[in-house]
C-alpha cells in the first residue's frame, strides 16, 4: 500500500533518517527483559531495527492506517501489533506482569502523558528510551536549580537514572516539526522503592511545583502541616531548589509530622 500520511491531530511526524532510527534502537541495553514495546511506530522506521535484535518486539499504534501498513510490510510483527491507545490500554493484557522496555518516537502532543503512564508500570519497566520534543527531553533529565526542573524531572528521577543522549534536527522528519527533538534513556534504579509513602511523595512534588515561585512554606499550606514542622529551614526554599533526595526527605518529615 502507499505510505501513510502524517495526521496532525495525532501529532505524527515520521522520521526519515535511517541512521538516527538505528541509533535510537541501539540505546536499549537489552538487560533484564526479553520484550520491548514501541509506542507509535508509524511506518516502522524504528521498528525494523528493533526486529533485528534478540528480543520480542511489540508495537502499539492508535492510527488504523499505520496498523494496516505495519501488518502488510512487517511479517515479523504478525500477532504483535496492538491497535490501542497506550494511555488507556491495560498493557498487562500482553505482558502479564513480565518485565519489558518501552521505546518510541513519541507524539509530542502526548509525550509527557506517556511518561506518567509508564511510571504507573515502573515495577515492570527497567528501561525506557526514545525521542521527545527537545525541551521535554531536557526537562525530564534536568537537575535542580533551573527553570526547566519540575514535576516531571523529580518524579522520573526518583525511580530512574535519566540521561539526555543527543539532539535531532527538524529536517529529518516528514512533515518537519517546528522544534528540535531530543533522545533520552531512562534506566530504573536498582533500589527504586521509595523510603516514604509514594502517594504522599507524588502529592508533595506536584503541590510544591504548582506554585513554584513561592517558598514551600506557602505552596504546601494545603497539607495542613504543624507549626513546629513549618519552622524547618527546608520550607524557606522554593521547589526547584530541592533535589530528588531532598523531596524524599521532606516527604518523610511530613509523614512523621502526621503521626
Image (tube, helix red, strand yellow):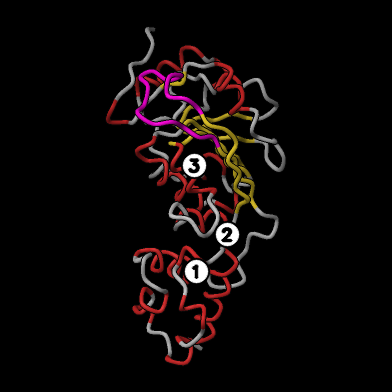
> Which picture quadrant has residue 225?
bottom left
From the top left corner, tell me how far across and down residue 113 is, in percent. Answer: 40, 46
**Residue 2 lies in magenta, yes or no?**
no
Cα–Cα span, label 1 and label 2: 10 Å
Q: Is residue 173 above or below residue 244?
A: above
SS for dot 2: loop
From the top left corner, tell me how far across and down residue 48 is, in percent. Answer: 57, 18
CB-based contact (under 8 Å), mark 1 and mark 2:
yes
Residue that badge 2 annotates:
158
Which one is in front in this view, the residue at disc 1 or the one at disc 3?
3
Instruction: Determine crowd level at label 1: few under 14, some 14-19, many 20+ residues with C-alpha closer than 10 A.
Output: many
**Residue 175 lies in magenta, yes or no?**
yes
Which one is in front in this view, the residue at disc 2 or the one at disc 3?
3
CB-based contact (under 8 Å), mark 1 and mark 3:
no
In magenta, the rendered stretch is 168-183
Residue that badge 3 annotates:
137
Q: Earlier in the sequence, mark 1 or mark 2?
A: 2
Viewer-side residue, 62 vs 231: 231
Horizontal side of residue 40 vs 252, given as left or right: left
From the top left corner, tell me how far across and down residue 84 is, in percent. Answer: 39, 35
SS for dot 1: helix
Q: Earlier in the sequence, mark 1 or mark 3?
A: 3
Cα–Cα span, label 1 and label 3: 22 Å
Residue that badge 1 annotates:
201
Q: Is residue 72 above or below residue 15?
A: above
Q: Give the residue drawn at x 50%, y 29%.
A: 59
Q: Is residue 148 above or below residue 179?
A: below
SS for dot 3: helix
CB-based contact (under 8 Å), mark 2 and mark 3:
no
Amino acid at each position: 500500500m502507499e505510505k501513510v500520511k502524517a495526521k496532525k491531530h495525532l501529532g505524527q511526524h515520521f522520521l526519515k533518517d535511517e541512521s538516527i532510527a538505528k541509533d535510537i534502537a541501539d540505546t536499549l541495553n537489552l538487560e533484564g527483559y526479553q520484550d520491548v514495546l514501541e509506542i507509535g511506530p508509524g511506518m516502522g522506521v524504528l521498528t525494523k531495527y528493533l526486529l533485528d535484535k534478540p528480543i520480542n518486539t511489540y508495537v502499539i499504534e492508535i492510527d488504523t492506517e499505520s496498523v494496516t501498513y505495519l501488518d502488510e510490510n512487517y511479517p515479523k510483527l504478525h500477532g504483535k501489533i496492538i491497535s490501542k491507545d497506550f494511555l488507556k490500554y491495560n498493557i498487562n493484557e500482553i505482558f502479564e506482569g513480565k518485565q519489558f522496555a518501552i521505546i518510541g518516537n513519541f507524539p509530542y502532543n502526548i509525550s509527557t502523558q506517556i511518561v506518567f503512564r509508564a511510571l504507573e508500570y515502573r515495577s515492570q519497566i527497567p528501561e525506557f528510551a526514545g525521542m521527545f520534543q527537545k525541551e521535554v527531553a531536557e526537562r525530564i533529565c534536568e537537575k535542580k536549580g533551573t527553570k526547566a526542573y519540575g514535576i516531571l524531572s523529580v518524579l522520573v528521577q526518583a525511580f530512574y537514572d535519566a540521561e539526555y543522549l543527543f539532539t535531532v534536527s527538524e529536517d529529518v522528519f516528514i512533515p518537519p516539526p517546528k522544534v528540535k527533538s531530543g533522545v533520552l534513556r531512562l534506566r530504573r534504579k536498582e533500589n527504586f522503592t521509595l523510603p516514604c509513602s509514594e502517594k504522599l511523595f507524588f502529592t508533595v512534588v506536584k503541590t510544591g511545583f504548582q506554585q513554584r515561585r513561592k517558598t514551600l512554606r506557602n505552596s504546601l499550606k494545603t497539607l495542613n502541616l504543624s507549626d513546629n514542622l513549618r519552622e524547618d529551614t527546608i520550607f524557606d526554599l522554593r521547589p526547584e531548589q530541592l533535589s530528588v533526595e531532598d523531596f524524599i526527605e521532606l516527604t518523610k518529615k511530613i509523614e512523621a509530622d502526621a503521626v
